[in-house]
Image: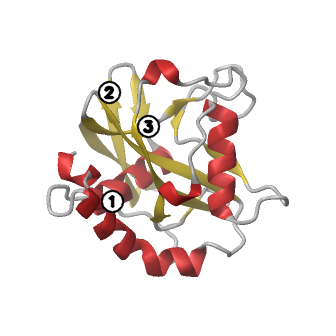
Amino acid sequence: MLPDCLSAEGERRCRRLLAEATARVRARPAAAAVLVPLCAVRGVPALLYTLRSSRLAGRHKGDVSFPGGKCDPADQDVVHTALRETQEELGLAVPEDHVWGILQPVYDQAKNTVVPVLASVGQLDPQSLKPNPEEAQNQGYTHFCQGGHFRYTLPVFLNGPHRVWGLTAVITEFALQLLVPGAYQPRMDFPWRSKG
């Protein structure tokens, strides 16, 4: 990512572009919310991911993901869900005024709405994070077929032994389109994309 995406001007541009969707989506019911933490690591812009524990139940154990989870009835809205889950999973308290806005919601395979919330967490020392042990630039695309016919295409990002795929890769692609317009050209096509 280019360094200007973390500048005050970059933040204002993103907040302006996300304002309408944020106002429209924020109070809507959703199944889950994730935080898309924009940070700087040694001065380089980055997105912060988590690596889910391989001891978790379910099919996403050991996956790279954004911090987040199911909306709780006590949560005021999806922004509060994303901030609460980030605190629970990483021990990282993100003030609400650091939220830049809501990216385009997506659907999981069960058609549940997942709302990505973009926030700046500033300069980050990865050693300072306190992940909960119970939670816890190479790009390509995967083409999916069904019944011998092309069905949809999703992004995949590879870095060392870790693979960012599925909804996390889709949300990463949305974030890159917003943060570095013109420098990132997506090529995905999938059927369960939310219409806003």
- Residue type of the residue flagged with mark 1: Met
- Residue type of the residue flagged with mark 2: Asn
| Residue 23 versus residue 85 in the image, above or below | below
Q: Residues within 10 Å of mark 3 (few under 14, many from 20)?
A: some
Callout 2: helix, strand or loop? strand
* Res 159 label: 2
Residue at the extreme right of the image, as rendered: 73
- Quadrant for residue 9, please give it: bottom left
Callout 3: helix, strand or loop? loop
Image side of residue 167 versus residue 160, left or right: right
Q: Can residue 168 be seen in this view?
A: yes
Residue placed under numbered mark 3 in the picture: 48
Say which of 9 and 162 sits in front. 9
- Quadrant for residue 93, please give it: top right
At 43% from the left edge and 63% from the top edge, which residue is drawn? 190
Residue placed under numbered mark 1 in the picture: 188
At 65% from the left edge and 39% from the top edge, which residue is drawn? 87
At 53% from the left edge and 66% from the top edge, which residue is drawn? 105
Q: Report the Cα–Cα distance between label 1 and label 3.
A: 22 Å
Colour pattern of the rendering: secondary structure
Which circle's residue, 1 or 3, is located before the other in the chain?
3
Image side of residue 70 versus residue 176, left or right: right
| Residue 113 versus residue 160 in the image, above or below | below
